[in-house]
Amino acid sequence: MSELDGQEFNEEADVVEVPDVAAIDAIQVEESDVELDGAIAPIDEAIIEEAPEGEATKKPSWLIPVLAVAGVLALVAALVAGLFYFVDDFKLPGFSTADFGDAARVNKGSVTQKQLNAEMSRIELSQPGIFDVENGGVDEAMVRSQTLDELINQELLLQKAKEEGIEVSSEDVDAELENTKAQFGDEYESALEQYGFTEQDLRDRLTFQFLMDGLIDMLVPKDSVTDAEVQAYYDENKEGFTEAPGKQVSHILFDLDDEEKAKETLALLQSGEGDFAALATELSQDPGSAAHGGDLGWGSSDAYVPEFKAVVDELAEGEMSDLVQTQFGWHIIKITDTREEGIIPFEQVKEDIRNMLYQQEMSATYQDLITALRDEATIEILDPVVLAYRESLEDAQDDFLDVFPEDAQ
C-alpha cells in the first residue's frame, strides 16, 4: 500500500479507498473558519465599535449589495446543480453528467470518463447484446474495468512517446486517412457510424498508431532479427515446414445460363489461341480467383465440391478439363503445378520466419514496456463502477481465502 493524494491506493488492484467523508467535511469547515476569522470577522468588529450606541447590530450599507450578489450567485449555483442532477433524465443531446471528470489519473495525465464511455459504446455497437448476461453476455463492469486498463496503457505509451521526442506529421496521418477512405469507398461514412467513430476519432487512432510504430521501431529496429537467427529457427523446426502433396488449381467459372460462352472459351483454349490466366481475369464469375488469373492456390482436393474434386484428382500437371458443371456454374479447370510431400526449401520461407521472429520480439518488448511503465507510474482509479467491481473481486478473494486458507500460500 502507498499513499496517493491523501488516499490509500492498492497498487495490486488499482483500488482507491476513499477517506471518511465526515473527516473531509470537518477539515473543510476548519479551513473555512480560518478564512472567515482572518478576513470578515475583523471588519465586522471594527464597524460595531464605530457604530452609535444602540445600533451595534445594524448591517453596513455596503453589505446589502454584496449579500444581494451572493444570493444571486447561490441561486445560479443551485440552478446549475439542479441541471446537473436532472440532465440525464431529460437526455439532452450531446450532454451527459457521466462524461464529466476523470476515470483515472495517470502520472500527470488522465483518462477521462468521456473516453471510457465512448469505448464502451463502441464495444456495444460492434457487439449488440454483449452485456445481456441473462442471454450469454458478459459482465459490463468487468469489460469496463478491462477497457479502462487498456486506456491507461495507451496514456502511458503516449507519455513515453512524448518523452522520447517521437512526432507524427499531419501529412502521414492525412495520407493514411485517405487510404482508409479508399478502402471503404462508399461505405466509409456508414462504417464510422456503425462503430461509433467520428473522423476525428479515426484521425486520433491513426496518430496513436504512428506514435506506437515509432516507439517500437526505436526499441526493436527492423533489422534486429539476424540471418543467423532465421537459419537457426529453420534448422530447429524443419518438421514444421513440411508440405503435403498437392496440386495448384486454376479455373474459369461461368454462370449456369452461360453454357454457350463457356463452350466458346473452352474451344479457344483447346485451339491454343487463348491464354488461360488472361481469359480467367476477363471472364470468370469467381471474383476472388479471377483477380489472380483463376488461381485457387495449393491445397487438398477435399476442399472442393465432389464434381470439382473428381476432375482435379484425375488431371495431371499442365492438363485442362472439359466443361465441368457444379452447383456454382460451369468450370474450365487447369492444373498449373504439382508437388510431392517434403520439406519446404529455406529460401521459400526465410522471410516468413524473419517476420514471425520480429513480431515475437515486438510483442515481448511491448509487454515488458507496459509492465515497466505501470510499475513506475502513479495511477489512481476514479471511475466508481470500476472501483466497485474491483472491490467486489477483493471481497470475493478474501471470502475464498477464509474458506481455503491453504491457497494463500
Image: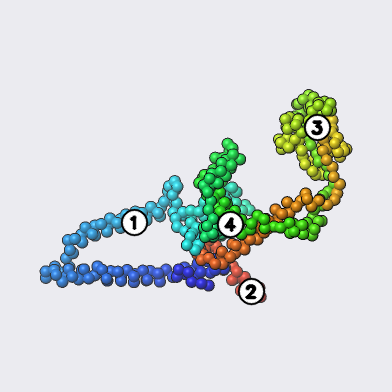
Q: Could you say which quadrant of the image residue 44 lies in? A: bottom left
Q: Mark 2 or 4 closer to N-term?
A: 4
Which one is in front in this view, the residue at disc 1 or the one at disc 3? 3
Residue 145, placed above or below residue 39: above
Which one is in front in this view, the residue at disc 3 or the one at disc 2? 3
Q: Are marks 1 and 4 in contact (CB under 8 Å)?
A: no
Which residue in the structure is indicated by mark 2? 408
How far from the left and from the top, in percent, is residue 3? 48, 71
Q: Residue at x 81, y 26 (%)?
A: 273
**CA distance separating discs 4 and 3:** 51 Å
**CA distance separating discs 3 and 2:** 68 Å
Which residue in the structure is indicated by mark 1? 78
Disc sitting over residue 361 in the figure? none
Residue 15, placed above or below residue 94: below
Residue 310, placed above or below residue 203: above
Disc sitting over residue 215 in the figure? 4
Q: Residue at x 13, y 68 (%)?
A: 51
Badge 1 marks a residue whose secondary structure is helix
Q: Quadrant of the C terminus?
A: bottom right
Answer yes or no: is residue 282 visible: yes
Q: Mark 1 or 3 closer to N-term?
A: 1
How far from the left and from the top, in percent, is residue 215? 58, 57
- Disc 4 residue crowd, few under 14, some 14–19, many 20+, Cα 10 Å: many
Which residue in the structure is indicated by mark 3? 332
- Residue type (three-letter) at the residue carrying disc 3: Ile
Left or right of 407, for residue 49: left
